[in-house]
Amino acid sequence: MKIRYLALFAPIIFVACATRTVDEAPYDPLQDYEEVDAATILDAPEPIPGTFSPENLYQVKRGEYLVELLGCGACHTDGALEGVPDFDKALAGSSIGIAFSSPLNNARPGIIFAPNLTPDEDTGIGLWSDPQIESALRIGVGRHSGRKIAIMPWQGYTKMAPEDVSAIVAYLRSIKPVSHKVPDEVQVGEETDKPFVYFGVYRSHNEE
Ligand code: HEC
């Protein structure tokens, strides 16, 4: 019985092996796939006393609450995308990237790294004006002029009440500055050994 089964499947196994050697075989992202549990709910770090006035304490606390609720740290904290957030670098940017091109088309996708949101002047948003931070959040204008912010769901923040946006900005200015430069963006097709995850919805371009 077993031998008969083997005889039946042997040609199929052979065909399967043969097709895998063809160069034009479409890239199968599942070959490199390893499921990870991203950390989505993260405590936002405490504001540092002295970085805000007693008058805007409520605003800063509200910002902390919103940042926690909206899961900013899930992308902007190192390690969170692999389920092991580094709380010493909370909101200081991620060295694990997120692919912005389709895994179905590109074996080497383009990758971006959620930047440092702490008030550090060199690597964070310390030198950004309030309107610059607000524009990044509400209309997706980031450091890269000429294109909209990718991956971050800013479209969902567009309708946020202005007081809430200001509260987030006030909060981000109140946390500990952490010097942490995230890696530069990786272009589609560029070779890299930087770690990254896939994220997003991909649509086929086939006309049929
Ligand atoms: C799903 C992941 C994700 C979430 C959630 C997220 N971001 Fe982002 N954010 C990114 C990425 C990735 C970029 C860089 C995008 C780019 O360069 O195109 C970015 C860019 C930014 C920028 C522009 C900074 C710069 O240096 O260009 C700000 C400000 C920002 N995010 C704040 C926030 C805040 C505040 C929240 C929560 C309300 C948040 N983000 C939630 C992924 C995320």
Image: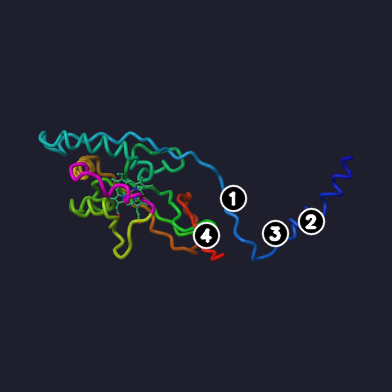
Magenta residues span 151-164
Q: Amino acid at mark 4?
A: Ser
Q: How is the image coloured?
A: rainbow
Q: Image point 54% across, 64% down: which residue?
A: 206
> Vertically, is 56 above or below 118?
above
Q: Image point 40% across, 59% down: which residue?
A: 185
Rounded to the nearest whole Å, what is the CA distance between mark 2 and mark 1?
21 Å
What numbered label is drawn on residue 30? 1
Is disc 4 placed on a helix, strand or loop? loop
Report if the CB atoms under discs 2 and 4 are less than 8 Å apart: no
Q: Name the image quarter holding the C terminus.
A: bottom right
What numbered label is drawn on residue 204? 4
Disc on the earlier residue, 2 or 1: 2
Report if the CB atoms under discs 4 and 1 are less than 8 Å apart: no
Rounded to the nearest whole Å, what is the CA distance between mark 4 and mark 3?
22 Å
Please give left or right for residue 140 compared with residue 81 in the image.
left
Q: Amino acid at mark 1?
A: Leu
Q: For marks 4 and 1, give the one nearer the viewer.
A: 4
Based on the displayed image, in which of its 4 quarters is residue 11 positioned? bottom right
Q: Amino acid at mark 3?
A: Arg
Please rate how many residues cluster around mark 1, counting C-alpha atoms within 10 Å: few if below 14, some from 14 to 19, many from 20.
few
Q: Amino acid at mark 2?
A: Phe
- Residue 158 belongs to magenta span: yes
Percent position (x, y) of residue 166?
A: 19, 44
Is disc 2 placed on a helix, strand or loop? helix
Please rate how many residues cluster around mark 3, counting C-alpha atoms within 10 Å: few if below 14, some from 14 to 19, many from 20.
few
Circle 3 sits on which residue?
20
Report if the CB atoms under discs 4 and 3 are less than 8 Å apart: no
Please give left or right for residue 27 compared with residue 153 in the image.
right
Q: Image point 22% across, 40% down: which residue?
A: 171
In the image, 89 versus 32, the foreground residue is 32
